[in-house]
Image: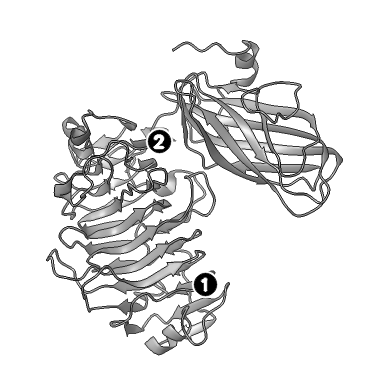
Amino acid sequence: MTVNLPCSRYLAEHIVSASPHPNFADAGNYTITNECYATNPGHSSVYYFGLLYSAQMQTTEGYCRAYIPYTGFIRSYYGSVFVQTTLATGAATAAVYLRLTKGDSGEATDYEIGTVGFTERVNPFSNAGLMIPVSEGDYFEIKMITPDWSVHPTGVYVHGTAYIVATGGETTSSFITASGPLYGANNYNRYGYNITSGPIGGGSGYPSIVTTGDHIITTKAELVAHLSSGATPATSGQTIFVVGTAQIDMSGNTYLGIPSGVRLASDRGNAGSSGALLYHDHNTSGFLPLFRCVSGHQTVTGIRLRGGQSGTEAGNGNFTGIRFESGKYITVTNCEVYNWPFAGITYYYDGISGLSSVGIGEFHHNYFHNCQKTGYGYGLSLMQSTAKIYCNKFDWNRHHVSGERDPLSPYHEVNADSYWNYFEANATNTMYDQHGGNDNPSWGFSSGPDAAVAAGGDIRIHHNTFKSASQAAVGIRGVPRTLCYVYGNWTYWAEAYSTSTFIQRLENIGLTPYQHMTVEDNWYGTTAPPGS
């Protein structure tokens, strides 16, 4: 496809090969700058700007198109608002989005960058966590939604820069050393990112262990009293700390709530501590959680959470350790979660639109194991939610990670970024499984195959180690809404079987792989990759 850019000087002046990311190869990566001149933005209005130089912000989209010359991914955006004349009053901020329009279909999608104020002369904004797939011929504008200021600003200038990694320009494993790219989870601490360090799976050596709290717990009665329905529930900002030697039988309890803004903690990994054990051994019928957390802003750290079934037997119980739903800003870290017949943790319905949004659930440095009931059995299960899953260890689960489909809401799929995880060999089915439109009634989906039901939205699976050479590493059961991008992983399967370990199932909807799925630059076989 040939792209006719508005003017050739845009390529010369605004597409450069130098990369702001030291771990990225420079060749083929580029930036596109956007700007607008003196504008007096009004209250509660929508504006657009892009590559129409010496122009004010526009109230009509499509006038300021910044065209994409090379296929790749927008990885970050950095911008600044300069208020020359009148500063805004009032604490409200404007919402900023990158509005991408596909060149082939004209379909437009808003990706959240963040918010920006107008109360200072210089007001920066940015998002360094983007992964927006773009194709040659697409175009974008920056969309800004202003608040209802007390006094609106005047003389506003905006400038921003999008950094794009061209396909083939960045080594797709993303992380480069003198000896070449790194693969798998083994060397995650060498990647140069500002991440939480510590051992994969958490425990001893984890650097953020909690050792005390506002409420010190040794018994079940004390714990229940400080939960949502208790006599003296903890309040936002407080920590409920269960002492590391405690072993509390929670059998008979279900739907226990952790108050919004509260941290439930113990000291797993501190001076040999295994962390407090909360266990539930009674698996009665029904899909029941021990904890059910709504409204968001909850953290669980350093706890051992044990269910009542370690094996694959069918049984009647479908218990889950923790069910998070209808909330943002969820964090589970440094926990051991095991023996739950349905799932160790489920994360449902967070209302977040994608991986560039704020409030994404984070699940890191945990050990999920022995959740393997026949027909269910998930270490971590996602539905209509957006999550970062990193530095975890998964073992002895049916599916280590599962993304559910929801045909009733086809535009709120699972979005997940999974990296630096150990997917151990002991899975009884596909290790990373994402349901979608290829599902059929024999798999438990009475609605049958439906090509309109996406298999997730934005799925990124990279720099993980998949240790099985018999169970598939990744199974995508349909077509993702945006893209499933699988790269930089180490799988024990031989390269000749790459489509058997990174599978896309489309046979029930009349398609052939890969559709909206890219598999490239992974390491195959049991021989360790370079640098391991």
Q: Residues within 10 Å of mark 1 (few under 14, many from 20)?
A: many
Quadrant position of the C terminus in the picture = top left
| Nearer-the-camera pick, 14 or 489 | 14
Q: Is residue 412 left or right of residue 377?
A: right
Q: Quadrant of residue 214?
A: bottom right
Residue 152, horizontal then vertical, whole percent: 81, 44
Q: Residue at x 81, y 39 (%)?
A: 83
Between 43 and 350, the one lying in front of the other is 43
Residue at point 27%, 67% (across, down): 287
Snapshot quadrant of residue 454: top left
| Residue 364: image location, x then y, percent | 40, 58
Side (left or right) of 290 relative to 214: left
436 displayed left or right of 14: left
The front one of 444 and 175 is 444
Q: Amino acid at mark 1?
A: Val
Crowding around mark 2 (Cα neighbors within 10 Å: few <14, some 14 to 19, many 20+) is some
Up/down of 282 relative to 400, above or below: below
Q: Position of residue 218 (x, y in %)?
A: 41, 87
Label 2: which residue?
A: 482
| Residue at (47, 64) in percent of width and height | 207
* Identity, as a three-letter code, of the amino acid under mark 2: Thr
Q: Is residue 448 visible?
A: yes
Residue 262: which numbered mark, if any?
1
Residue 16 visible to the viewer: no
CA gap, disc 2 and disc 1: 34 Å
In depth, the one of 469 and 284 nearer the eye is 284
> Answer yes or no: do the residues labelled 2 and 1 have beta carbons within 8 Å?
no
